[in-house]
Amino acid sequence: QVQLVESGGGLVKPGGSLRLSCAASGFTFSDYYMSWIRQAPGKGLEWVSYISSSGSTIYYADSVKGRFTISRDNAKNSLYLQMNSLRAEDTAVYYCARDRGLVDYWGQGTLVTVSS
Amino acid sequence: NFMLTQPHSVSESPGKTVTISCTRSSGSIASNYVQWYQQRPGSAPTTVIYEDNQRPSGVPDRFSGSIDSSSNSASLTISGLKTEDEADYYCQSYDSIQRVFGGGTKLTVL
């Protein structure tokens, strides 16, 4: 069965950095686009970034462009999100998701809190 | 860029039918599939409708989806409402560049 397990969330000060990881299993990771999606407390879902199966195509939401970097390691079946220059408004649960243009599997999410 | 607009909230009584709309701001609603997710508090979203009108296994046939090109919108209809249907519902679609979620609709079954 498909499993996506995020890790790396936590409390960080404004201006700080954090790296999220997502361990994938139960499918051929290298065949699929992958995405990061976030949800601020009490708010809706926001697509943050996606990466193609080979890593050659990448998209970022305007809200994170220039600060966040998505990457993947197909040999390790892993997806990453490097988050720099974090702001209070980046506080959210971050979900790893398998992406077909539409999401067919979600991780359980990892909470990132940006606060002094 | 396009946006998907949903009503902020809807409410209906148990046993009744409710429809949640999702209107695409630009580009045709029919050009890319629409998917609907249900999210209960503290949980990740789950799919209730995929590819405009398909139901995943395990989702009751009380849930149905459709698109209407004349209004450039998609709809999620839930019939025979149950208290367990109370949740947030999000539509989602995409184009060649972006993936877009609607703002979400809080369904209250009272």
Image (cartoon, rainbow, N blue to C red):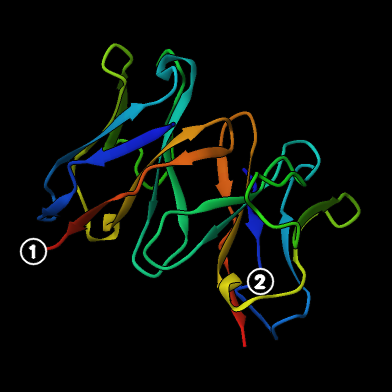
- For the view shown, which residue lies furthest in the right direction? B70
**Callout 2: residue from which chain?**
B
Residue identified by numbered label 2? B7
- Mark 2: which secondary structure? loop
> In the rendered view, does B57 fall on the left or right side of B84?
right
Give the Cα distance between marks 1 and 2: 35 Å
Depth check, front residue: B8 or B56: B56
Three-letter code for the amino acid on which mark 2 is drawn: Pro
Seen at 31% across and 20% down, the residue is: A77
State the count of labels: 2
**Callout 1: residue from which chain?**
A
Foreground disc of the pair 1, 2: 2
Depth check, front residue: B22 or A17: B22
Image disc number at residue A116: 1
Seen at 70% across and 86% down, the residue is: B13
Three-letter code for the amino acid on which mark 1 is drawn: Ser
Q: For the N terminus of chain A, which image quadrant?
A: top left
Seen at 56% across and 40% down, the residue is: B99
What x and y, as percent, mark residue A56? 43, 14
Image disc number at residue A72: none
Seen at 74% across and 44% down, the residue is: B54
Residue A34 vertical position relative to residue B70 in the rendered view, above or below: above
Label 2 neighbour load within 10 Å: few <14, some 14-19, many 20+:
some
What x and y, as percent, mark residue B36? 64, 52
Q: For the C terminus of chain A, which image quadrant?
A: bottom left
What x and y, as percent, mark residue A27? 44, 22
What x and y, as percent, mark residue B11? 66, 82
> In the rendered view, does A61 fall on the left or right side of B30?
left
Label 1 neighbour load within 10 Å: few <14, some 14-19, many 20+:
few
